Image: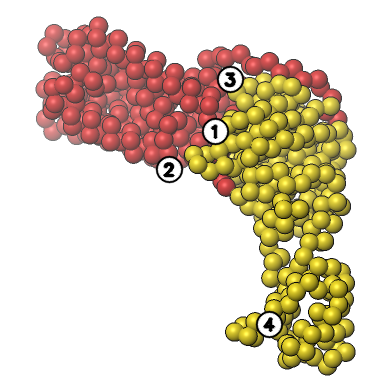
Chain colours: A red, B yellow
Amino acid sequence: MSTTSPATSPPALTSPKASLFNPTVARLTYRALLGRRRALILFALPALLVAIAILVRSLVGADDTTANGILGGFALGTMVPLIGVIAGTGAIGPEIDDGSVVYLLAKPVSRSTIIFTKLLVAIGVTVAFSAVPILVAGFVLNGNSQQIAVAYALAAAVASIAYSALFLFFGTVTRHAVVFGLVYALVWESLFGNLVPGAKTLSVQQWALAVGQKIGAEGAITSDVQLPLAISLLAAVTVAATWYAGRRLTSLTLAGEE
Amino acid sequence: MTSLHIDHVSRWFGNVVAVNDITMTIAPGVTGLLGPNGAGKSTLINMMGGFLAPSNGTVTLDGTTIWRNAGIYRHIGIVPEREAMYDFLTGREFVVANAELHGLGRAEAARALATVEMEYAQDRKISTYSKGMRQRVKMASALVHDPSVLLLDEPFNGMDPRQRMQLMELLRRMGDEGRTVLFSSHILEEVEQLASHIEVVVAGRHAASGDFRKIRRLMTDRPHRYLIRSDNDRALAGALIADPSTAGIEVDLAEGALHIQAIDFARFTELLPRVARDHGIRLLTVSPSDESLESVFSYLVAA
């Protein structure tokens, strides 16, 4: 075997500067996200939404109430959190689980940079696979009458940010991030978020709806949370979850298998 | 020259003490970290690699604390024991990504792949690699930034003899070049072949340190226990106990065997067949009853 030149570099052991984005971390993250079998759900759910939209439009014709039901119920209530779970937890959970995250951590790259980059990728994937198809489905359903398509798409985009941060954090805390994420998305957001009045205030879905309400025509979309509160809570959850995820990664220990 | 200093380091997980007050210095050259499974080798390597905080004591690289200091990775290369490594990439993509994370590029990646002789398979997906190929690509990823310290956790596990020899050759050369190379192993022969310096860890404690010949002698000089069956156990026992190489013999009637404690290993192994032949005794079973590494190591701890 050939060898490299002798190692003679003097130690310069300053910590690397944190930045918001590392293209290599991003590339590894999205390739891991889209390369996994779970990624099929990323394609299947939006395809299902658009298929439903086409079917409903051809059977019922353009109808604002039906559009509202499909976009608010299935799309924003179920699809967005599910895609958020897959993208958010998938951006970091499996790497921590199987130990391959060691190749990112054993580098002179700040761990905050790793978290920020993974968050951006998770947000990008969630927006691409939820907000964009919602916009398409909205136009198919009623041609954006009452601004419903745009309103729900923006609400989904806003929700994508909060879900990504939240589920990325789950991914750094527990091996069962997907299970926790699913329970949160389906039980809390879909069930309690729609039924229990108190839970509605603490539901990403309702906060996103508040944004949609502002954009949609008067009375087209309703939320139980006022817009200023909704935006504050969205920002608070996103910042807090990202900060904690960064902290978790900074002190992440890879205990031996002994 | 770069050295790792482990100073009065302990690490516990809940009530379990994995590493117990260990002090050692890993200097340039190849050092073998030897110990049975579960001795705390991985815990130690994880602390040296900055993936685990010591519960007590300090781990430093030329005086700089390793824990929570990503800057040290400019000087440390790590080859983890675990298999997982972005299997959906090709070997080349993987090493290039590692180079980029160091702020380097394709040229350095190509050089590292050449060092481990993996160019021939660099465009295949890692998921198709054999264990040995994975190990070499892991090595390439650790060497890409030309580190002065190289940490390898059980690097020879699952490698075939040829791959093992190649990796040993490579590590030896890295050590000769003045790098600080530390590898862990639970196999004495592996460590003996490669490392001039050995650190032995048993049950979380630092059992021995130094030249392998010294440690090897300690290991062979310990009392050995044998289980022996013959067609005349009592006559054999009488003849063996007369020799000073034997410290004690128990006739186990239930087992139909002799338990023998030999204190002079070389002399006893030569004595046994001679005594049997001279007395016309047929040996049916001769088996060492404490050859497990654990017993060898626990002897070392007591020594």
CB within 8 Å, label 3 to label 4: no
Tag 1 and tag 3 share a subunit: yes
Task: Judge whether residue B176 can be spotted in this image.
Answer: yes
Identify residue type, mark 1.
Thr
Question: Mark 1 — on which chain does it sit?
Answer: A
Q: Position of residue A92 (x, y in %)?
A: 47, 31
Identify residue type, mark 4.
Val
Alpha carbon of mark 1 to alpha carbon of mark 4: how far? Answer: 52 Å
CB within 8 Å, label 1 to label 2: no
Question: Mark 3 — on which chain does it sit?
Answer: A
Alpha carbon of mark 1 to alpha carbon of mark 2: how far? Answer: 28 Å
Q: Which mark is residue A37?
A: 2
Alpha carbon of mark 4 to alpha carbon of mark 2: how far? Answer: 63 Å
Residue that mark 3 sits on: A110
Alpha carbon of mark 3 to alpha carbon of mark 4: how far? Answer: 66 Å
Residue that mark 1 sits on: A253
CB within 8 Å, label 2 to label 3: no
Question: Mark 4 — on which chain does it sit?
Answer: B
Q: Secondary structure at mark 3?
A: loop
Question: Mark 2 — on which chain does it sit?
Answer: A
Q: Position of residue B254 (x, y in %)?
A: 59, 84
Q: Earlier in the sequence, mark 1 or mark 3?
A: 3
Q: Secondary structure at mark 4?
A: strand
Q: Position of residue B216 (x, y in %)?
A: 82, 55
Identify residue type, mark 2.
Arg
Residue that mark 4 sits on: B251
